[in-house]
Image: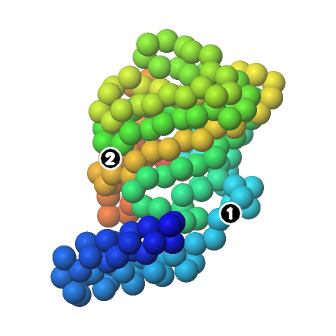
Amino acid sequence: MNQDHSIHGQHNIRHQYLSIGYEKSRALLGTRTNIMKTLIPRHASEVTPQTGCSYPEPFKTRMGEVSWRALGDVFGLTQFGISLETLQPKAESALRHWHALEDEFVYLLSGELILRTSDGEFQLSPGMCVGFKAGDDNAHHLVNQSTAEAQYLVLGSRVAGDVAFYPDDDLAWFFTDRGRTANHKDGSPYTV
């Protein structure tokens, strides 16, 4: 029964693709087939951790020791990102910020974190989650005030033209022919 259902489902998918035109459907089916052939499940610990911070000084050293594993990138995901992030004691996830166009979601796996928002501070423990809607100016970030590391998943949509706002800090990102640059809110660049 499951096999028949699977074959019937494949037929429906092919029928949907064919209804949009032969050339486009062949391209889509070919892409789908190629993805299916190369899909290999991974353990998150196999994804190379990244460290560092793109903020200029004086903000960079304020962040502390942070690492992340870009899990979605391993599979070529383009519409949303998902990272496994680790905050060491006294580290901050980011400057307090909000996004104009991107949604964000955080799920705490281990440790304890403080969520700082425009509404106040909240203690997060494992299993707790929180979401931040695009365009909501309730700025947020996470701080590890404990003596143990904390791990969490962060998911975010990837929307071209998104801008992050930092109400507490003199920082603005500008997009120029040289790429993304860190600037003061008056437009003058930070020097490296």
Residue ID for mark 2 = 162
Q: Quadrant of residue 14?
A: bottom left
Q: Residue at x 53, y 20 (%)?
A: 116
Tell me residue 123's x, y (percent). 62, 16
Residue 170 visible in the displayed image: no
The kind of secondary structure element at disc 2 is loop
Circle 1 packing at 10 Å, graded few (<14), some (14-19), many (20+), is few
Report the residue that reaches farthest toward the top.
120
Coordinates of residue 85 in the picture (x, y in percent): 64, 43
Query: x, y percentage for residue 138?
Result: 38, 23
Q: Amino acid at mark 1?
A: Arg
Q: CA distance from mark 2 to mark 1?
A: 30 Å
Q: Is residue 46 visible?
A: yes
**Residue located 60% across and 26% down the image:** 128
Q: Nearer the viewer, residue 157 or 21?
A: 21
Q: Amino acid at mark 2?
A: Asp
Measured as percent of width and height from the top left, residue 182 is found at: 43, 46
Query: Which is closer to the viewer, label 2 or label 1?
Result: 1
Badge 2 or badge 1: first in the primary sequence: 1
Instruction: Judge the density around disc 2: few (<14), some (14-19), many (≥20) Cα neighbours within 10 Å.
Output: few
Q: Nearer the viewer, residue 167 or 156?
A: 156
- SS of the residue under disc 1: loop
Q: Residue at the far front: name it.
A: 1
